Image (cartoon, rainbow, N blue to C red):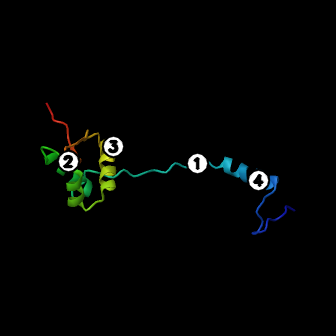
C-alpha cells in the first residue's frame, strides 16, 4: 500500500513525484481562447479617444486627453500605445515647446 503524505509534510517521495509528472504529461494543455472585443464600439472611451485624435487638426495634448476622459497620464499613454499596436492607426507623438506631448494622426496625402 502506498504511503500517504500528510498535509503538513513538505516533501514528497520520488515515486509520488513520478506519478504526478506522468499525469501532467498525459493531459494536454488547453489554450485559452481570448475573446476579441470591438475597440471601435461607439460610446467607449477608446472610441472617444480615437475620435478626439482624428478631429484635432494640430493634435491633442496628453493633458487634454486625461481631462476629457478622466484618465491618469500612464493610462492614456498605455491605451494610445495599444491602439497603435492593435489597430495600426499610426498615431504619432511630438514634443512641443512647452514640454507637452501632442498626439495626432499622420496627414493623408
Q: Which of marks 2 and 3 is in front?
A: 2
- C-alpha gap between disc 4 and disc 2: 63 Å
For disc 1, the neighbor class at 10 Å (few under 14, some 14 to 19, many from 20) is few
Q: Mark 1–mark 4 contact, CB under 8 Å?
A: no
The residue lying toward the viewer, choosing from 84 and 62, is 62
Please state the horizontal and vertical placement of residue 80, each as a whole percent of the image.
29, 48
Where is 23 relative to 88, above or below? Answer: below
How many badges with numbers are in the image? 4
The residue lying toward the viewer, choosing from 11 and 21, is 11
Q: Mark 2–mark 3 contact, CB under 8 Å?
A: no
| First-in-chain label (3 vs 4) | 4
The residue that label 4 is drawn on is: 17
| First-in-chain label (2 vs 3) | 3
The residue that label 2 is drawn on is: 98
The residue that label 3 is drawn on is: 86
Please state the horizontal and vertical placement of residue 41, each as a whole percent of the image.
25, 54
Q: Which of marks 2 and 1 is in front?
A: 2
| First-in-chain label (4 vs 2) | 4
User: Which image quadrant for residue 5?
Assistant: bottom right
Amino acid at each position: 500500500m502506498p504511503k500517504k503524505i500528510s498535509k503538513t509534510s513538505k516533501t514528497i517521495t520520488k515515486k509520488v513525484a513520478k506519478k504526478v509528472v506522468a499525469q501532467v504529461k498525459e493531459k494536454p494543455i488547453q489554450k485559452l481562447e481570448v475573446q476579441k472585443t470591438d475597440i471601435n464600439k461607439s460610446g467607449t472611451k477608446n472610441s472617444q479617444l480615437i475620435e478626439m485624435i482624428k478631429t484635432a487638426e494640430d493634435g491633442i495634448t496628453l493633458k487634454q486627453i486625461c481631462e476629457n476622459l478622466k484618465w491618469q497620464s500612464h493610462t492614456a499613454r498605455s491605451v494610445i500605445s495599444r491602439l497603435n499596436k492593435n489597430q495600426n492607426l499610426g498615431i504619432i507623438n511630438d514634443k512641443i515647446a512647452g514640454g507637452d506631448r501632442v498626439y495626432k494622426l499622420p496627414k493623408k496625402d
